[in-house]
Amino acid sequence: MQTVIRPLMTDDYASVKDIFYDSFKAPEYADKNCEESWRDRSIPDSYGIFSTKGVLLGFAIVSFHKRNGPNRYLDYLAVHSAYRGQDLGSKLLSHILNICETLGQSIHLYPVKSERIRAWYRSYGFCETAGGYMNRHFYRTRLSLKSRDDKET
């Protein structure tokens, strides 16, 4: 399927909300809040994956939390139930990870309590930390410091 990934715009909210509540409707998601996440998102860093006809197929809401400094936090990633199993979530996550790698930023998330979802994130290089939190680091900064130190010796 041909798709386009682009930042989410204000006009995309209704579709995001539909996919959000379809994806996070189980009782364990009762505390999830689409409106709050949408309001607090980083606008240029939150993406949708669209069909070539402009239909939103999935989204990733990304924010920056004070405790994570300049690193990204993946609040939500979801694909419309009618389009799951077509690697759309993988395309969207890969897009975000490529940006993080280019910028030398880490990305953090707190996935749902599903071993299948956690394993999926691990397959993209995420590591688990205390309390179910996961992160993926891009250590270019440390490599740059090492190169600088090597030049000085």
Image (cartoon, rainbow, N blue to C red):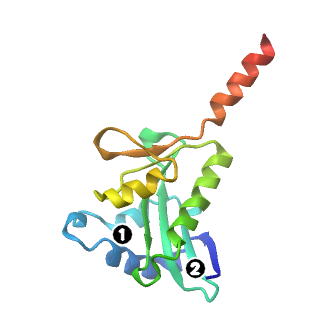
Q: Position of residue 111 (x, y in %)?
A: 36, 55
Task: Locate the C terminus and report the quarter of the image it occupies.
Answer: top right
Q: Which mark is residue 35?
A: 1
Q: Is residue 23 above or below residue 121?
A: below
Which residue is located at x 51 percent, y 47 percent? 125
One can see residue 74 in this view = no
Tell me, yes or no, if residue 21 can be seen here: yes
Report, in whole angstroms, how far the alpha carbon at label 1 lies from the one at label 2: 21 Å
Instruction: Give the percent coordinates (x, y) of residue 86.
Output: 52, 76
Give the number of the disc on residue 54: none
- Going by the numbered disc 1, the residue's amino acid type is Glu
Q: Return the residue at label 2.
A: 50
Disc nearest the viewer among 1 and 2: 2
The residue that appears at 60% across and 85% down in the rendered structure is: 54
Q: Residue furthest left?
A: 27
The secondary structure type at the circle numbered 2 is strand
